[in-house]
Amino acid sequence: MLIVKPSSVSVALPFSSIWFGTHLREKTFRAASLLRYCSIFRVRRIMVILDGGNPTQHGELKDVFEYLLLPPYLKAEMGLKPHLRYVGLAPPIKIPIHTVSKNPQEASLEPVRKASVIRVERERLFLNAGFRLQTVAPHRGDLQIGDHVYVKVIGLQGKVVLTELVDPLSLDKIYLEPKIEFIDVDDVGERLPDDLFKVELTRSGEPSLRIVRNPPNKEIIFFVGNQKMDPEDFLAVKFDIRIRLLPEQGVETIRSEEALLIALSQTAWILG
């Protein structure tokens, strides 16, 4: 399992810049590519701003993201939903929780892995943690069948893999996957933590060299616009800085996914 720390960067992307187009294959590939870009640069959080679409479409994107983030041994639990038809054509994400061992003894050296609850008894849980052997953990709280948990493998007892539940809050120093949340466009301003440095990506901003030379001493979040508007045109957010990624671009417009990739690339070595 690859062990790296999370970056200090989050991103905010409009729903309308991710899940659009006439063909499901195109939408799926775009969403998967954005998710992979964020994972490459160890982005902490992806905020999807619901600036369009309807609840059904929002649910489709949520399912695609959830499917792509699941370890291979848990993907079958999503079922054969029609809007997941093309997820197999998307580039694999291969985040740390995907690169775990199938051998329980080797897995005991891993800090954590993701599992799903398949049966609940009064004092223990039965889990799908990617092993052929039965896997159990002591029961805690009000977990139900289908819930996802993080577990640590602690050993073998006969043909049973013994694990213990791990509090997700204790894993904040290890990068496992980007956390994804969907937020209504009107709620973005009040849902943002005060200690975030808010960066708007816009062609009318100042050169991005200043933020590279003088990085903020706190976590930052990049805001990307949609096809028609800059973030400031549809969000009630006070940005700390508005930056232009390229002083001279050779194309008329830079797409949202391209802007995000450029921003993450330019700041990766500085922001960590």
Image: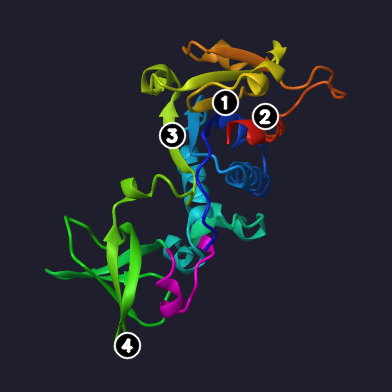
In the displayed structure, does residue 237 sit left or right of residue 118?
right
Task: Please provide percent x and percent y for residue 262.
Answer: 71, 32
What span is in magenta? 98-110
Specify whether residue 82 is in view: no
Q: How is the image coloured?
A: rainbow
- Foreground disc of the pair 3, 4: 4
CB under 8 Å between callouts 1 and 3? no
CB under 8 Å between callouts 4 and 2? no
Residue under numbered circle 4:
159
* Mark sitting on residue 182: 3
Q: CA distance from mark 4 to mark 2?
A: 49 Å
The amino acid type of the residue labelled 4 equals: Lys
CB under 8 Å between callouts 2 and 1? yes
Residue at screen point 69% across, 29% down: 259
Is 167 magenta? The answer is no
Residue situated in front as seen by the camera: 120 or 79:
120
Residue at screen point 37% across, 23% down: 191
The amino acid type of the residue labelled 2 equals: Ala
- 218 up-or-down from 205: above or below: below
Q: CA distance from mark 3 to mark 4?
A: 41 Å
- Foreground disc of the pair 1, 3: 1
The amino acid type of the residue labelled 1 equals: Phe
- Tell me the element at label 2: helix
Magenta segment's dominant SS is loop
* Mark sitting on residue 263: 2
Q: CA distance from mark 4 to mark 1?
A: 48 Å
